[in-house]
Image (cartoon, rainbow, N blue to C red):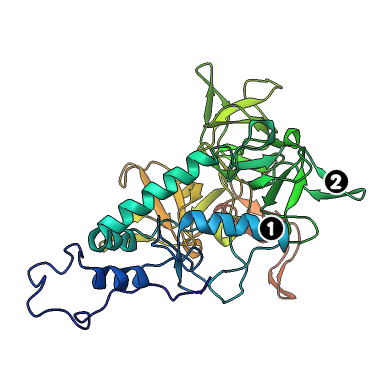
């Protein structure tokens, strides 16, 4: 079919309009045959050449198509060419997860061509009834269903898709046994789909997590009314409990238990360094006075603990209670805090003495035998005392 440009609403009255027509409401329905032809030209899908249903605009070329036409285009392209490419002519790779329906364009079609749209919907419903099983796949699955690999999928004695990798079903394969799946990631870096048996698939884990993924507890987790897993404890995702909960095997439990724990997907986060290289539950101290509205709310040196990553540039930190300043929890920049280390347990109380020269940049800044008082510890620990 002829490929048509993405529809745009004209800024000026359409040529040939009778003077004064629809001046009170520019979005009033179009009734005469001439306007109907113009609207069809304006809102035609570039694939089926009919007025668009559930108009969806592709980001690669800016053109719009029927959503159903795009899904059929993807399926046909996967089986014929391997990788679906944009039907708008830009030839870029198409995502199998389409953008949301273009609501502005849909409303314009509903307002300007209601009768044509009604007829188009009636035809689409008839087509669906004639082929009611087109999206039903083997194993009780359905096309465009979100899934994940239930085990490692092997290509020629090598892992091609890791267990837990998310994907989306395209449809049945031609052998009446396999289903075609576009996984989010393949170990060989290919964009091609994979034909797998239905039993190699499972429902995706809640929250976008994967089997085998390392996670960290975002809160103190209660088990039978007591803290069973502390904030910041690491673990590994081993399964799916239900649509909202994961099964996690934590590295350590406070209740001396050894088994797995069912947690909400909102109670854990992927294990990774936070902004500034900090970690959840890491002990820190304020590196400077923290000021809000020209008032010091957290004095320099106040101990605290990292709770979470607030944004790409800030951390959420809980500082200790102080009689003058009260409880405090702030979103801070990494430069406003620093790691806080405990003093060595064998360090004597009271005055201390350097047991050796303390060197900085190859120069002795404190000679051995120099006496001093404890003032705290930083990330270098208290050595040489």
Mark 2 crowd level (few <14, some 14–19, many ≥20, 10 Å Cα): few
Image vertical order of residue 377 relative to residue 125, above or below: below
Residue at horizontal 20%, vertical 64%?
31
Mark 1 crowd level (few <14, some 14–19, many ≥20, 10 Å Cα): many
Please provide percent x and percent y for residue 202: 67, 35
Can you identify the residue that label 2 sits on?
154
| Whether label 2 touches label 1, CB < 8 Å | no
Residue at horizontal 43%, vertical 56%?
100
Residue at horizontal 53%, vertical 59%?
70
How much space separates mark 2 and mark 1, taking CA atoms?
A: 20 Å
Q: Which of 4/100 is in front?
A: 4
Image vertical order of residue 177 relative to residue 41, above or below: above
Please provide percent x and percent y for residue 292: 30, 59
Q: What element does badge 1 sit on?
A: helix
Q: What element does badge 2 sit on?
A: strand
Please provide percent x and percent y for residue 230: 57, 32
Residue 78 got which mark? 1
Residue 111 got which mark? none
Extreme residue toward the right, this view: 157
The answer to whether residue 248 is seen in the rendering is no
2 vs 1, front mark = 1
Could you tell whether 24 is left or right of 195 in the image? left
Image vertical order of residue 295 relative to residue 229, above or below: below
Q: Which of 351/75 is in front?
A: 75
Question: Mark 2 or mark 1, which has the lower sequence index?
Answer: 1
């Amino acid at each position: 079919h002829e490929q048509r440009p993405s529809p745009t609403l004209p800024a000026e009255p359409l040529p040939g309009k009778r003077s004064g027509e629809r001046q009170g409401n520019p979005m009033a329905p179009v009734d005469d045959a001439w306007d109907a032809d113009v609207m069809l030209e304006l809102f035609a899908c570039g694939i089926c050449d009919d007025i668009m249903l559930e108009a969806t605009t592709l980001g690669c070329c800016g053109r719009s198509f029927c959503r159903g036409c795009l899904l059929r285009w993807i399926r046909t392209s996967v089986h014929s060419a391997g990788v679906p490419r944009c039907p708008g002519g830009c030839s870029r790779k198409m995502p199998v997860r389409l953008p949301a329906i273009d609501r502005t364009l849909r409303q314009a079609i509903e307002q300007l061509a209601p009768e044509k749209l009604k007829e188009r919907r009636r035809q689409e419903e008839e087509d669906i009834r004639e082929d009611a099983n087109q999206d039903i796949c083997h194993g009780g699955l359905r096309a465009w269903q979100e899934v994940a690999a239930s085990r490692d999928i092997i290509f020629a004695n090598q892992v091609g898709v890791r267990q837990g990798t998310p994907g989306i079903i395209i449809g049945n394969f031609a052998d009446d046994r396999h289903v075609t799946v576009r996984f989010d990631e393949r170990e060989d870096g290919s964009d091609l789909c994979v034909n797998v048996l239905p039993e190699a698939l499972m429902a995706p884990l809640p929250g976008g997590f994967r089997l085998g993924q390392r996670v960290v507890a975002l809160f103190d987790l209660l088990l039978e009314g007591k803290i069973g897993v502390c904030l910041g404890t690491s673990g590994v995702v081993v399964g799916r409990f239900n649509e909202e909960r994961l099964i996690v095997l934590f590295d350590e439990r406070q209740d001396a238990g050894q088994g797995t724990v069912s947690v909400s997907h909102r109670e854990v986060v992927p294990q990774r360094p936070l902004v500034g290289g900090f970690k959840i539950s890491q002990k820190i101290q304020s590196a400077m006075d923290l000021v809000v509205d020209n008032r010091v709310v957290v004095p320099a040196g106040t101990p605290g603990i990292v709770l979470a990553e607030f944004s790409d540039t800030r951390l959420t930190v809980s500082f200790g209670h102080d009689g003058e300043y009260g409880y405090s929890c702030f979103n801070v920049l990494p430069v406003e805090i620093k790691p806080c280390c405990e003093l060595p347990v064998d360090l004597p109380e009271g005055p201390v003495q350097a047991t050796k020269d303390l060197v900085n940049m190859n120069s002795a800044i404190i000679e051995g035998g120099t006496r001093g008082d404890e003032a705290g510890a930083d990330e270098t620990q208290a050595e040489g005392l």
